Image (cartoon, rainbow, N blue to C red):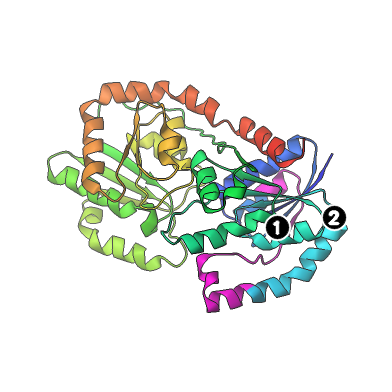
Amino acid sequence: MARVLMVHPGAELYGSDRMFLESVRGFVEAGHQVSVVLAESGPLLAEIEAVGVPVRVQPIPVLRKAALRPAGLAALLRTAAVTWLPSWRLVGRGRFDLVYVSTLTAPGWLLLGRLRGLRVVCHVHEAEDAGRPVVETALVAPLLLTHRVIANSEFTKSYVGQRIRLLSPRTTVVPNGVISTADRAPREQLTGGLRVAYVGRISPRKGPQVAVEAVRRLNDTGQPAELALVGSVFTGYEWFDRELRKSNQDLLDAGVVHLAPFERDPARTFEDCDVAVVPSLLAESFGNTAVEAMLAGRPVVVSDIGGLPEVIRGVASACAVPPGDPTALANALRATVDTWPTQRQAAWAARDRVRQRFSPGRYRTAVVEAALPE
């Protein structure tokens, strides 16, 4: 039995938060003694405590691009200075064997674990290609402190290895484990028009504006369609939410676009839709939403960028289109309508294969095996 300290710089229930919870469950199920540090209180905290794991909430210095500027770096160093001693003492008292850090944005814990002489593992969920190699290399560099890097996709592994080649041999790919409670088959007839669903953060990089414009173009060209935008606004992007609403007020008033807040379980949203879209403008390292849609037996259209094509590979009812292209997205949605009987059957038939490939049980076992020494 190993003593494992697990650190996560968030407390919500979005993609990386859910994967952290599954990782916690994996170590517990394998018989290890687990303690968790979270950066804040939130719904994730209660989920972890329900597993029987003690949780400590304290500020965590988070390395973001803003921290590479003078003001951001000063704020990062202040937080690090305040939290270093309590964190050092925590690790010492716990007599841990392993420090598992979720995401590469909390490098202080990687350094702390190394200085304490412990095995250090980082689970990477980020792979954003911002076109600034120096900045991206700086963000990845703390991974040199690890004994093992766990990447959520081949794309993420490639992203890390292209920035620092030394990290490639120590990086293991463990695809996310995703579950869905959806069990209603797609409707046989698209009566009343196509129902499209977008589930995710309301932020520019996630591309909800592309989905809205694609649905607008479908309606303008005679194909009735509705869009459900389900998700909360990413902190700091409230302006985008206001702009999205203002510029599409006509569609909101007409009932063509529907807005709904974040759902812990989006199964009902996927059951109510005919097709899901993941129209990201920037690279996604994985794409939990695409997997959830496929598990629900729905066709899905994703952006041909990052890890999204990798996630849908081999699924006949899923396709990729160029990012930021509402016309291409609209055309893909129209093709789904034109071939609906085939798409419907293929999407429903793909569920078992998708379920096996992205099984939470397989994920939990693989994370523990990758994190602990042989």
User: Hey, which residue is sitting farthest left in the picture?
Assistant: 221
Relative horizontal placement of residue 368, taking residue 88 as reference (left or right) = left
* The N terminus, quarter of image: top right
Nearer to us in this view, 177 or 368: 368
Nearer to us in this view, 371 or 188: 371
Relative horizontal placement of residue 369, taking residue 348 as reference (left or right) = right
- Give the alpha-carbon distance from disc 1 to disc 2, as whole Å: 16 Å
Q: Which mark is residue 195?
A: none
Q: Where is mark 2, residue-wise?
A: 94
Q: How many marks?
A: 2
Mark 2 is surrounded, within 10 Å at the Cα level, by few (under 14), some (14 to 19) or many (20 or more) other residues, namely few
| Rendered residue at 45%/42% (across/down) | 307
**Given the image, on which type of amino acid does mark 2 rest?**
Gly
| Residue 293 seen from this side | no
Residue 276, image x, y percentages: 35, 39
User: Hey, which residue is sitting farthest front in the picture?
Assistant: 165
Residue 316, image x, y percentages: 35, 25
Q: Where is mark 1, residue-wise?
A: 110
In this rendering, the label closer to the viewer, 1 or 2: 1
Secondary structure category for the residue under label 1: helix
Please say whether residue 211 is one of the residues in the magenta stretch.
no
Q: Which residues are magenta?
A: 47-76
Please say whether residue 54 is one of the residues in the magenta stretch.
yes
Nearer to us in this view, 194 or 300: 300
**Given the image, on which type of amino acid does mark 1 rest?**
Leu
> Could you tell which of marks 1 and 2 lies nearer the N-terminus?
2
User: Is 115 placed above or below 176 here?
Assistant: below
| Residue 147 seen from this side | yes
